[in-house]
Every structure is written in structure tokens, then in C-alpha cells.
Image: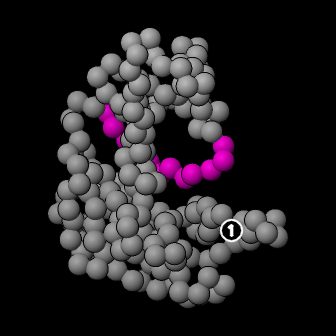
Amino acid sequence: MHWYNSKKIIVFDIGKEEFRKMAVPRTDGSIERQLVCINGCLSLVGFDKHGCSAFEVWVLGDYHNSASWFKSFTVTYTSLAPPKLVGCWKNDELLFQNSKNLLSCDLLSGSFECLQSLDSEADATIFNYFETFESVYGCGVQELQTNDSPSMMGYGGPTKAQKSSREKQEKGETQTDGSKKKKDNFLSVGFKLKL
């Protein structure tokens, strides 16, 4: 497990149950970074806080040697504000969100592709979802359903009606109108959409 705090990475070794610090590449402090895993390698994506229209991707070459960071990619973009990094997408692609679109960036070519236009009236946020054995319902997330859309995830915990409906579905009972709604909570593997 890894956490990044702008000066170092904190590593928790689950097997040894130990914490340790890992050094990161030095900057002048104007770079805002985010920790990601690209192709199985620990990586940092860095944006200039002062509006430079490029981002850098640093990759840790040898996991046991924190001096092995190297700059792997520099990608330019045309928007005034940097897009928000959501996470990794496929092998050499990063997933970004700006105010209007969900974008993928091919790191090898440096090209961006619009995956989905976001409705300007909807306050949509895309975030990483890590599959665990713990139910998201126990973490203050509730299932929201409308009559005309598949279920989506939101915050606040399940209501009594939702708990009752889920219990009936688990027992194999149908809903009162006799139809069963499909559940499609995934935007894609590893990502959830919160409206």
C-alpha cells in the first residue's frame, strides 16, 4: 500500500506489517503530483501548478531502489487548466476528467481521445474504485435508483426501502411490478461514476 504526501511516499508492507518512507524525484515545488500504477510500475504524474500545458510521468525503475526514478513521458495538452487525473486506463493510457469530457491519454503517442461528454447540468465525478471484500454499503455509500435509469452509487447509506428491496432480490423475489432491474454500477472495470 502506498500514500503520497508531496515530499515522499509512505509504503506499508502488508507481509511484514511495517511502514517505510520512499524518496521521490526532487522538484522546485511548483509540480503537483499524483501516485498511480502504470503497467505494474509505481509512477508519479506531475502537473505544473502555474499553468504549464504539459504533464510529466515519472516511473520507479527498481522498486527496492528509490533512486531509480526516471522521467518516462512528457505530454502536452491544449486546455487552460490541467485536466483532473482519474487513474490508469488500459496499459499505457491515463484517464482524465475536465469540465466537459472524460478523456483518455495514450502515453506513447501523447494523444487525447474523448471517451464521454459529460452533461453540463450533472455534477459528475469519476473516481477510482478498488475491489475489496468490504461492502461499499458499509462505508456510507447508498444505491440510488430511478424509474428510468440503472442504479448508480451515491453517499448516505441505504434507505430502509433499499435494504428491503435488496433482501427480496437476494431471496429471489421479484419487485412489485414484476420486473427486475439490471444492475450496472461500473463505468468500466475499476471506475465508478458518482452523480
User: Residue 146 placed where, x, y %?
Assistant: 36, 21
State whether the magenta stretch is mostly helix, strand or loop: loop
Left or right of 70: which side holds 4?
right
Left or right of 69: which side holds 90?
left
Extreme residue toward the top, this view: 176
- At 39% from the left edge and 83% from the top edge, which residue is drawn? 72
Nearer to us in this view, 104 or 168? 168
Corner quadrant of residue 83: bottom left
- At 49% from the left edge and 66% from the top edge, which residue is drawn? 36
Q: Is residue 137 magenta?
A: no
Extreme residue toward the left, this view: 78
Can I make out residue 34 in this image? yes
Can I make out residue 82 in this image? no
User: Residue 129 placed where, x, y %?
Assistant: 50, 50
Q: Which residue is mark 1?
A: 11
Label 1: state its secondary structure: strand
Query: Is 149 above or below relative to 117?
Result: above
User: Residue 58 placed where, x, y %?
Assistant: 45, 78
- At 38% from the left edge and 58% from the top edge, which residue is drawn? 85
Nearer to us in this view, 161 or 56? 161
Query: Is 91 above or below relative to 114?
Result: below
Question: Considering the image in quadrants, where does the C terminus appear?
Answer: top left
Q: Which residues are magenta?
A: 123-134
- At 66% from the left edge and 47% from the top edge, which residue is drawn? 133
Nearer to us in this view, 174 or 78? 174
Q: Indicate the amino acid at tag 1.
A: Val
